[in-house]
C-alpha cells in the first residue's frame, strides 16, 4: 500500500510540474519580462479549460485554407496522437530488437573484429539523429535516380499517413544507444562468479549469455531505458517536423495556449509514467532511502581545525596531486580535447583579425561577364562549401559560428553541474524525506517529457521577434543559457544528490560522523574524492546533450541570440551566425536536394560530439577497473571433452594502466 501511495504522489507531483511549465511562457509575453500576473492568469486558464467540457479542444490550422479549426481532445487522441505514438512505439521496438541481436554479434566476436565493431558504434553514436534522416534520404534518392524505384516516402502530403521512413529514421539513434547499453550490461554481468561457474561446466559463450545473463541484463536495461526514451521523444518531434507529419508537434505549434500545452504534455507524460510505474511495481523496485545515521546526528557545518588541516593537505600532497593530473594525460582525452580547443582557437582568431566578416556572393559570372549562377551557389574552387540562399559563404559562417556553439555548450553544461552540485548538497544534508520525495517525483516525471519540446516552449516567446526587440542581445543570451541550464535542474540535483547519498552509506563515512566529523570535512574528504570523477563524466555527457539540443532547436527555428521574422519571407534571420542557425534550412534542403548547405555544419557537430564521446570513454577507463575474461579459443567454440572441471581465468587490468 505504501508503494502505491508513493507512485500516486509521484504522479500528482509530475502533473503539477507539467501545469507549472505549461503556464511559464506567459511570464515572458506580458508588458514586463517576468509578468507574474499573466502567469497566474495562465494557470487559471488551464484550470478552467480542463474543468469546462466545452473547452476541451485544440486549435488546428488547415494547411490549404489556413483556417483555424477547433479539434476536440477525443479526436486528437484517436487521430494525430495515436499516429505519432504508433510511429514512436514501432521505432522503439525495432531499435530494441535489432540492438539486442547485434549485441550478441559484438560480444561473440573477438580481437580486431570486435574492436572495429565497437569503434563503429562510437562513430554512429556521434551522429545527431537529424544526420541519419539526412543520410537515409540521400541514399533513397540515389537509388531512385539509378533504378527509378522509390524505396521510402519522406513527406506526408494532404494528411497522408506514412510509417516506414519515419520509423526507420527514428529507430537508428535508440538502436545505437540500446546496443551500447546491452554490451556494457552483458560485459558487467560476465564478471559475476556464476558466469565463471557456468563456463567451467563447459557451456559455450552463447549459452552463458542467453541462458544465464539475459534475464538480469533485460531487467537492468529496463531501468536504464528511461534516458533513451527521453532522447527518442525529442527525436520524434524532429521527425514529425521534417516529414511534414501532422502529429503532436504540429498541433502544439498551432495551439501554444497554456491549455493546449498542458494537454499535449500530459498526453505524452501519462502513458509512459503508468507503464514504468506498473513494471517497476511488478519487478519490486525499491526507492533509495537516506542513511538513518544522518537523521539522528546533527552535523556541524564547519570546523576551523578541520579547515586548517584541509589547507595544509593541499601543500603536503602536491606530488600525489600531480600524479593524479598526469593520469589524465591519456590520448583518448588529450587528442579530442586538442581538436576542440583548436577549432575554438581558430574561430576566435578569425573574429579578432577579420571582425567575423562573411563574404556575400549573389551572382557568379563567367569569363564573358554573363551570369553563371545565382545564390545559393554550389561548392567550387572559388567558393569553398558553397553559399546559403542569401549568398553568404558557408565556410566563413562555420568559422564564425564554432566559437559560439563550443563556448555556450561548455557554459551550459558547466552551469548544470554547478547548480546540481550546490543544490545536491542541500538535497542530501538539509532536505526532509518529503522534500526529497517531491524532487525525485519531479525528476521522474521529466524523464517522460521531450526536453527539446519544453525548451522550445520556454524560448519561443523571447527568441523570435516580429518587430523591435524588447531585450538586448546580451539579455537574450543570458536568458537562453539559463533556460537550457535549468530545464534539467531537478534531474541533475536528484542524480548528484543520490550519488552523494550512496557515498554517505559507506562504513568509513559513518565512522567519520560518529567520531564527530563536520559536514565540511565529510564533504571535502569523503564525498568529493568519490564524486569528482563522476561529475567530470556527467559534465562531458551534458555537453553532448546540449550539442544535440542545439541541432533540434535550430531545426525548429530557435537560434542562439534569437531571430527576426520577415514579412516577405518565411525564413527567420538569425542575430548571430551560429552552427544551429545553419541547420534551420534543413526542411528546404530536403525538397531542393541542395545538400551542401547542410553537410558542413552537420560534419562539425559530428566532430564535436565524437570528440566529447571519446573524452567520456577516456574518463570512464581511468576511473573503473577493467575486468577481461581470458579464455582459450577452443573452449569458446567446442565444449571441453576433459571430464575435469575447467575454470575460466580472470585477468584484472590495473585501473590506471594506459
Image (spheres, rainbow, N blue to C red):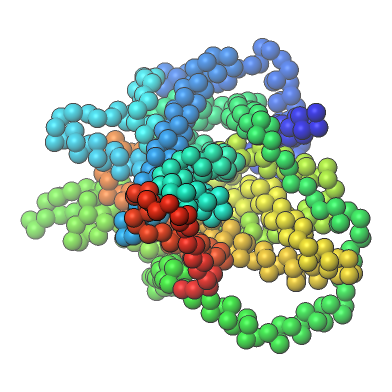
Q: Which residue is at the front of the view, 488 or 37?
A: 488
User: Outermost residue, left direction?
Assistant: 368
Q: Which residue is at the front of the view, 419 or 537?
A: 537
Q: Which residue is at the front of the view, 548 or 178?
A: 178
User: Outermost residue, front direction?
Assistant: 643
Query: What residue is rendered at 81% in x and 53% in y?
Result: 291
Q: Which residue is at the front of the view, 180 or 218?
A: 218
- Please provide percent x and percent y for residue 279: 63, 31
- Please provide percent x and percent y for residue 344: 44, 68
Looking at the image, can residue 116 be seen?
no
Looking at the image, can residue 244 be seen?
yes
Query: What residue is rendered at 34% in x and 50% in y?
Result: 637
- In the image, 560: left or right of 439? left
Q: Quadrant of residue 320?
A: bottom right
Tally of marks = 0
Query: Does residue 417 sit above or below 65 in this rendering?
Result: below
- Please provide percent x and percent y for residue 626: 51, 63
- In the image, 504: left or right of 541? right
Query: Does residue 42 sit above or below 36 in this rendering?
Result: above
- In the rendered view of the protein, which quadrant contains the N terminus? top right
Q: Quadrant of residue 31?
A: top right
Query: What residue is rendered at 43% in x and 40% in y?
Result: 100
Query: Does residue 63 sit above or below 478 in this rendering?
Result: above
- Please provide percent x and percent y for residue 213: 51, 44
Query: What residue is rendered at 43% in x and 46% in y?
Result: 203
Amino acid at each position: 500500500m505504501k508503494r502505491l501511495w508513493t507512485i500516486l504522489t509521484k504522479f500528482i507531483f509530475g502533473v503539477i510540474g507539467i501545469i507549472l511549465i505549461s503556464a511559464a511562457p506567459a511570464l515572458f509575453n506580458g508588458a514586463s519580462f517576468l509578468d507574474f500576473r499573466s502567469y497566474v492568469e495562465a494557470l487559471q486558464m488551464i484550470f478552467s479549460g480542463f474543468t469546462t467540457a466545452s473547452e476541451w479542444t485544440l486549435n488546428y490550422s488547415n494547411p490549404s485554407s489556413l483556417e483555424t479549426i477547433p479539434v476536440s481532445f477525443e479526436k486528437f487522441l484517436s487521430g494525430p496522437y495515436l499516429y505519432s505514438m504508433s510511429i514512436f512505439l514501432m521505432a522503439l521496438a525495432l531499435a530494441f530488437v535489432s540492438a539486442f541481436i547485434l549485441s550478441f554479434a559484438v560480444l561473440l566476436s573477438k580481437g580486431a573484429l570486435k574492436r572495429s565493431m565497437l569503434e563503429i558504434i562510437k562513430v554512429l553514436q556521434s551522429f545527431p539523429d537529424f544526420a541519419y534522416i539526412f543520410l537515409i534520404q540521400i541514399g533513397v534518392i540515389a537509388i531512385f535516380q539509378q533504378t527509378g524505384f522509390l524505396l521510402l516516402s519522406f513527406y506526408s502530403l494532404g494528411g497522408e499517413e506514412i510509417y516506414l521512413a519515419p520509423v526507420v529514421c527514428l529507430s537508428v539513434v535508440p538502436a545505437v544507444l540500446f546496443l551500447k547499453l546491452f554490451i556494457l550490461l552483458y560485459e558487467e554481468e560476465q564478471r559475476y562468479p556464476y558466469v565463471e561457474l557456468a563456463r567451467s561446466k563447459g557451456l559455450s559463450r552463447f549459452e552463458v549469455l542467453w541462458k544465464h545473463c539475459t534475464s538480469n541484463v533485460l531487467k537492468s536495461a529496463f531501468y536504464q531505458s528511461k534516458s533513451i526514451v527521453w532522447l527518442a521523444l525529442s527525436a520524434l518531434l524532429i521527425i514529425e517536423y521534417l516529414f511534414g507529419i501532422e502529429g503532436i508537434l504540429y498541433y502544439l505549434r498551432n495551439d501554444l495556449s497554456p491549455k493546449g500545452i498542458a494537454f499535449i504534455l500530459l498526453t505524452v507524460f501519462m502513458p509512459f509514467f503508468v507503464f514504468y510505474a506498473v513494471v517497476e511495481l511488478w519487478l519490486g523496485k525499491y526507492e533509495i532511502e537516506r542513511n538513518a545515521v544522518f537523521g539522528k546526528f546533527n552535523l556541524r557545518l564547519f570546523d576551523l581545525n578541520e579547515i586548517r588541516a584541509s589547507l595544509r593537505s593541499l601543500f603536503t600532497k602536491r606530488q600525489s596531486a600531480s600524479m593524479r593530473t598526469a593520469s589524465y594525460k591519456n590520448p583518448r582525452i588529450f587528442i579530442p580535447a586538442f581538436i576542440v580547443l583548436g577549432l575554438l582557437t581558430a574561430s576566435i582568431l578569425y573574429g579578432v583579425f577579420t571582425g567575423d566578416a562573411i563574404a556575400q556572393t549573389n551572382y557568379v559570372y563567367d569569363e564573358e561577364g554573363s551570369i553563371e549562377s545565382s545564390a545559393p551557389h554550389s561548392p567550387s574552387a572559388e567558393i569553398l562549401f558553397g553559399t546559403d540562399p542569401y549568398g553568404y559563404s558557408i565556410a566563413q559562417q562555420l568559422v564564425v559560428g564554432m566559437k559560439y556553439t563550443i563556448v555556450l555548450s561548455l557554459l551550459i553544461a558547466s552551469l548544470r553541474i554547478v547548480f546540481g552540485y550546490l543544490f545536491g548538497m542541500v538535497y542530501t544534508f538539509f532536505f526532509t524525506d518529503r522534500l526529497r520525495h517531491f524532487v525525485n517525483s519531479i525528476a521522474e516525471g521529466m524523464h517522460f517529457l521531450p526536453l527539446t519540446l519544453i525548451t522550445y516552449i520556454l524560448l519561443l516567446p523571447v527568441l523570435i521577434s516580429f518587430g523591435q526587440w524588447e531585450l538586448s542581445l546580451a539579455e537574450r543570451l543570458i536568458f537562453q543559457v539559463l533556460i537550457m541550464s535549468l530545464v534539467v535542474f531537478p534531474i541533475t540535483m536528484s542524480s548528484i544528490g543520490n550519488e552523494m547519498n550512496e557515498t554517505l552509506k559507506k562504513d568509513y563515512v559513518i565512522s567519520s560522523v560518529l567520531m564527530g566529523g563536520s559536514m565540511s570535512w565529510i564533504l571535502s574528504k569523503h564525498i568529493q574524492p568519490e564524486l569528482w570523477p563522476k561529475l567530470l563524466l556527467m559534465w562531458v555527457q551534458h555537453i553532448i546533450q546540449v550539442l544535440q539540443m542545439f541541432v533540434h532547436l535550430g531545426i525548429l527555428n530557435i537560434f542562439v541570440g534569437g531571430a527576426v521574422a520577415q514579412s516577405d519571407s518565411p525564413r527567420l534571420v538569425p542575430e548571430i551566425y551560429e552552427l544551429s542557425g545553419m541547420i534551420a534550412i534543413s526542411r528546404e534542403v530536403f525538397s531542393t536536394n541542395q545538400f551542401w548547405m547542410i553537410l558542413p555544419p552537420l560534419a562539425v557537430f559530428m566532430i564535436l560530439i565524437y570528440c566529447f564521446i571519446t573524452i567520456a570513454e577516456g574518463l570512464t577507463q581511468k576511473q573503473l577497473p577493467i575486468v577481461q575474461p581470458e579464455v582459450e579459443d577452443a573452449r569458446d567454440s567446442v565444449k571441453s571433452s576433459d571430464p575435469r572441471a575447467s575454470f575460466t581465468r580472470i585477468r584484472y587490468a590495473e585501473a590506471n594502466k594506459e
